[in-house]
Amino acid sequence: MSDAATSIRVLLVDDHALVRSGFRAILESEPDIAVVGEAANGDEAIAQAAALTPDVICMDVQMPGMDGLEATRRITADRGGRAGVLVLTTFDRDDYLFAALEAGAAGFLLKNASPEKLVEAVRVVASGDALLAPDVTRRVIARATGTGARGVGGANGETPEPDARLTELTEREREVLTLLARGLANAEIARELWLGEATVKTHVSKILQKLGLRDRVHAVVFAYENGVAVPGETPAE
């Protein structure tokens, strides 16, 4: 394993010890990842997150006592913390998905995902990016545009007035927002626009700041609600 100072520090939260052991074996086989702690419920997760300052928390949803969704809310509300939360669950349910994203999770992955997907997800979240797989992106879009009161086209088929905050974005920032809405990660946006990944990360930060949005998930919803991206466009595969 690489030096702990340069490794991605991961906290595993799951009420089943065998599940934690399996995740630990997968993650610690990677030279750039170190599992620094484990927790069996939400209360332990909050305490361990404060004590161990992990980069990524792999969070189960259903646990005795405080569940993973409430723990995620409390951890992400701590502005002094740096951890990104990757929610891992057995259940592919929209209520879990949207509750996790609204709680501030940076990613959502099913436990039956391949070991490679788990490792990739941890690295994406550790980089400060959000894990919005194409299927998750489609569901976010459907919720934003199909059931929202201000969805694209509106309930009466009328096009809503674009949010005035869009005028604050530069042309390049609008391009980045459009690609972000398709579910592209920073590295993919960088390749698409022939930019450095650090430059894209700066653009994303400025977009969130100018639009007053909390995270990339809210940026996706904003983009579709305001016509920056169009429902029916194929998210990145």
Image (cartoon, grey):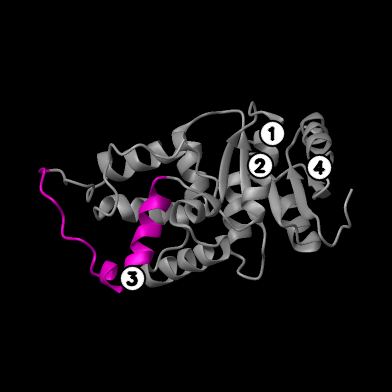
Is residue 139 shown left or right of residue 128?
left
Q: Choose mark 3 or mark 1, whichever is in front.
A: 3
User: Residue at 64% of width from left, 26% of height from top?
Assistant: 112
- How far apart are the alpha carbons under marks 2 and 3? 31 Å
Is residue 144 shown left or right of residue 109?
left
| Image mark for residue 104 | none
Question: What residue sits right under mark 2 in the picture?
Answer: 120
Magenta segment: does it hold 180?
Answer: yes
Q: What span is colored magenta in the figure?
A: 156-182
Q: Position of residue 197 (x, y in %)?
A: 56, 60
Disc 3 residue type (three-letter): Thr
Q: Nearer the viewer, residue 198 or 5?
A: 198
**Category of crowding for the residue at label 3, using alpha-carbon neighbours closer than 10 angstroms: few (below 14), some (14–19), many (at least 20):** few
Mark 1 and mark 2 residues within 8 Å of each other at the beta carbon:
yes
| Image mark for residue 116 | 1
| Image mark for residue 30 | 4
Q: Choose mark 2 or mark 3, whichever is in front.
A: 3
User: Residue at 80% of width from left, 62% of height from top?
Assistant: 51
Dot 3 falls on a residue whose secondary structure is loop
Compared with 170, 234 (above or below) is above
Q: Position of residue 161 (x, y in %)?
A: 16, 60
Q: Position of residue 131 (x, y in %)?
A: 55, 46
Disc 1 residue type (three-letter): Glu
Indicate which disc, 2 or 3, sits on the residue closer to the N terminus: 2
Mark 4 and mark 1 residues within 8 Å of each other at the beta carbon:
no
**Category of crowding for the residue at label 2, using alpha-carbon neighbours closer than 10 angstroms: few (below 14), some (14–19), many (at least 20):** few
